[in-house]
Structures are given as C-alpha cells and as structure tokens.
Amino acid sequence: MTREEFFAKFELFAELPDAVAKMREVILSSAAIGHLVPQDPGEEGADTALARIESDVVAAVRAKRLRAKRLVQSAREPFALPAGWKWASLGSLATPEDNAVCDGPFGSKLKTEHYVPEPGYAVVRLGNIGIGNFIWGKQGHISEERFHSLPSNHLAPGDLLVAGLADPLLRCCEVPTSLGPAVNKADCFRVRLHPCVDRTYIRHYLNSQIAKTLAADENHGMTRERINLAGAKGLPVPVPPLAEQKRIVAKVDELTALCDQLEAQQKERETRHAALARASLSRFAAAPTPANLTALFHDSYIITPADLRQSILTLALQGKLVPHHPDELGVPSPAKSVATSASPRDGASGPFELPTGWRWAFLGQLSELINGDRSKNYPNKAEYVQYGVPWINTGHIEPDGTLSIRSMNYITRGKFDSLRSGKIRKGDLVYCLRGATLGKTAVITQFDEGAIASSLVIIRLSAALDTRFAFRFLTSPGGRDQIFKFDNGSAQPNLSANNVKKYLVPVPPLAEQRRIVARVDQLMALVDKLEAQLEQSRITGKKLVEAVVDELVETKPITTLHLEREHFCTVQ
C-alpha cells in the first residue's frame, strides 16, 4: 500500500485500535524522510540555507556576540535523503547567539523555596510540553529577582520547548505568545532556531517516531529514557529546502486536521454507542438472557466485561436472574428467626425488596466464623517446609476464588496439630480481613485440611446457604458494599469476624440458590468467551494497523550509517 492509498482510504482503518494515533505517526515520519510532498529540483537546496547559517555564526564570532566559534556541526547520516536535502545536527540549526540551545537550571539555581504563588514569572516544566501543544496549568512561578538571575534560560515566543525525559522523549511544542516572561526547568530544552529553518517543520520532526528512534542512541536514562544537552544538540535532523519545509508543514497541517476530524467523529460515535450500551444493559436487566448479554458486547461500548460481571451478580442477588417457584420450600431456620430481617413486604427494612420466599439474614446466623490461631504457636516463615499441611494467607487467593497451589506455603504436621484455631475443611470459605485485599474470598476445594493466617477468617456455612451462592454474594457489589459499613477507615483497613457476622445476606430457597449459581456460571462463561473474542478482534485490528504502518515507515532502531532509504521505509 502506498502512502497516497493509505491517506485516501484511512477512514476504512479509523475504527481500529489506535488507528488515528498511528496515522499521526505515519504523517510525521513520512514528512521526515521526504515522502509527504513532491520535491522540486529547481528549488534552492538545503545546503544553501546551512551555508547562510554558518556565515551568520562566523560573523557573530567575529563581532564577539558569541564567546566561541560555532560552525555548522557535522551530523550522523542514518539513511539517505532525497535530492536537495542535507543532514545537520539540531544544535547547528540554532540562531547565532550564546545558549541558543540550553537546558533548564539544576541544583541551587532553582529550588523549591524559590517558587512563589501566582502571579509571578513562569517556570516551564516537562508537564507543560505536549506533543505539538503547550499544556497550561502545570507551570510554576518564581519572583522577578529569581527570573533575572537566570538570563540564559529566558524564553521567547516561538522558541521550541523539547522534553529531555520520557514519556515520550523529545516531545516538542512552541512557547506561546501569551505565556509572558518565563524560564525553562531542568530536562526541558529551549531551542531558538535560525530563520533559515522553519521551526514548525523542526517541531514536527522532533515529534516523529524517527527522531525518537535516532535519539535512542543518545539515551542516558537508567529507568526512563533521557537525553542530555549534548545529545540534544547532536541529534541528526534531515533538512529539506526551506520552500519544501513550508510545503511539508502545510501538508502535515492538512492531514492533522483530518485526524482531528476523525477523532471528533469517533467521540460522536462513542456517545451514540454509550446510549446504545445503556439501552442494551437495561434490556439485559429486564431479561438477563444469553442473547441479551451478547448484544452488550461491542468493541466501542464503554461497558466493560468487568462491569457486566458485576451486573450479573447484582441481578442474581436481587432475584432477577432465574424464575421463582412458589412450590419450593422457603428459607429454612435460622434465617426465618431473624427479627430484623423478615421480608420487606412485612415492613422490615433492607437494601432492596426481595422476591416472595426470600428472607434477609445476617451472615453470622447462617455460618460459623473461625479466626486463625493468634497464640504463641502461630507459624513464622522460618518454620515453613517444602511439603506438609497447607498454610493459607491472602496472597494465595486467586481472582476466581480458588487457591494458588504454586505459591502455597506449608507447615509440619506437628505445627498444625499445635494450632488451637483456624483449621479449614473442604467446602469452607476463607475471607480476607485486612489491607488492600480486604474482602478477597476463596472456596476450599483443593485441600481436605489446612490452616489460615491471622489476616483471614473461615466462614463455615450452615445447610441454609449454598457455598457457591455465598461466594457469589461476598464477591458481588452488594457483598463488597458490606465492607464499607464496618471498615474502620484507618490507613490499614481491616475488619473483624464480628463485623463479618453482621453482613446482611439476601437468602433464597436453597433450590433457587443452586439455580442462581448455575445461571451465573453460565453467563460468566459466556462473558469470558465474548471477552476473549473481543480481545482477539482488537489484537487483530491492532496488528493490521501496525502492519500497514510498518510497511509505510520502518520503526526499528537504526544502528548503521548511510542506510539506503528502502531499509527505512519499504514503500516508495
């Protein structure tokens, strides 16, 4: 596919993941290698403009406006350029004055105590530098005195601001006229270009993937990509004839406007899709069937599979997922004996109205809660063994409610026998009482015996509550809401077993509990399947766009000099 075909047919790709962002990448990279507009052999070549810059630098040195001679620096030549183009270093394209390319001040020159409330003189930070745009509201302010103590860093409208630190490295924007007196901060380079170079062209180049690839050779960061001042000054820049630079800028602006239009259309579609998604969700809530659930899966809907899973659990716990059978036995004792949890139809209060035959009950009336042993016999890590009796902690609970065998800890039979509490049985639930994993729940199916750490509590259910129904309740939005009624709000959130006993549970007849569990399992499996299909569709779409982009602009690191252009861009 040629670039012309790509741009002409781009609307066909616009719905694919990151398509518009990829188009912007193609536009800027195509501009940087001379594939965006045609060349004109009759135009004055870039070598003429570079000679003028060199002449101005020599004159400035002779007039002592420069402290040192700064002739046009040689640059690496990573790949061949079109006729009339030349390679130059970024530093060599600056206006002939001291500190035309400079980094912001470090150390004692600009400290936290130097900042003052607004109004003041602005300090431009990395957060102000967008990809082609200045981001307002992130700048600091210093006093007039401090501003005048940093003359080498004064900014002027039209100066380029270049990020020396990811993400992404080399993102570039211009200093806006409305900024007023300002200086740049550390890792924020100011570049003041010679008039023989179009600063908008240079800005587009620095924001291209090609510039970032070339800058990788100058990376000095340990944990984040970073380029220092010397690396920024030495960055190779492909320089077209000045007239072509201006044509490139006009073409980039035209295609960027198309990208903006496509993004606006995408947002409009997203708004419509959000309305459709809400309507589909309402239809599913009214009739939670697999067919209505399938209708909710659209790659542009804002409803996520996680949202759908929570919706399924909410409907299940409200009695809206399966039909009710009036002939089924009602909720057995002790749920009927809860004085404050009779059916809301009889005047009792509850979070929502329950179907006929259901009752509200406290979890403590439907189960026994057993804490872990907290005595001197509590095992420490030094007592763990490779094989033995499972010693279960919060980290062993998987998202699907199983226990991780791979990471399980074990204690000796003797240590297990010495524990006075916290011993599990198959079919128990274990529930997390502390920390960021508060409320994590697992069903004991993989072990016949074991013991729990003090961060967990065992929930041993009576015959009135199905194990899988209880698990679905505890992991549902309604079950999670119970946590916040009792959480103490400390920096290390925690519950007690007595708190968990007070959880209010909607209890259907036992046969209905099991039908609910079966329907939840069916719908969850369908969500898993549809989610996998949706993800595969997104991956395929992303790969399609990336394949097209890779065909148009090669993005692999360039490690040799004077590469033929075909190696950098495979489509002519």
Image: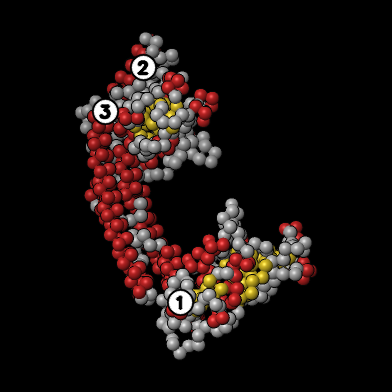
Residue named by callout 2: 57
Name the N-terminal-most of marks 1 and 3. 3
Is 36 drawn above or below residue 277 in the view shown?
above
- Whether residue 333 is visible here, answered yes or no, is yes
Amino acid type, callout 2: Val
Residue found 40% across the figure and 66% down from its top: 533
Is 386 drawn above or below residue 105 in the view shown?
below
Q: Which mark is residue 126?
A: none
Name the N-terminal-most of marks 1 and 2. 2
Q: Nearer the viewer, residue 452 or 46?
A: 452
Q: Position of residue 136 (x, y in %)?
A: 37, 37
Residue named by callout 3: 242
Q: Position of residue 234 (x, y in %)?
A: 43, 28
Q: Nearer the viewer, residue 388 or 335?
A: 335
- Which image quarter: residue 437? bottom right
Residue found 54% across the figure and 27% down from its top: 107
Q: Look at the numbered discs 1 and 2 and tell me whether their residues touch, using CB distance below 8 Å.
A: no
Question: What is the CA distance from the residue labelled 1 to the residue labelled 2?
Answer: 90 Å
Q: Nearer the viewer, residue 186 or 309?
A: 309
**Residue situated furthest front in the rendering:** 347
Q: Secondary structure at mark 2?
A: helix
Q: Nearer the viewer, residue 503 or 264?
A: 503
Q: Secondary structure at mark 3?
A: helix
- Which image quarter: residue 199? top left
Residue named by callout 1: 347
Is 524 drawn above or below residue 463 in the view shown?
above
| Label 3 Cα neighbours within 10 Å, binned few <14 / some 14-19 / many ≥20 | many
392 left or right of 201 in image? right
Amino acid type, callout 3: Leu
Question: What is the CA distance from the residue labelled 3 to the residue labelled 2?
Answer: 19 Å
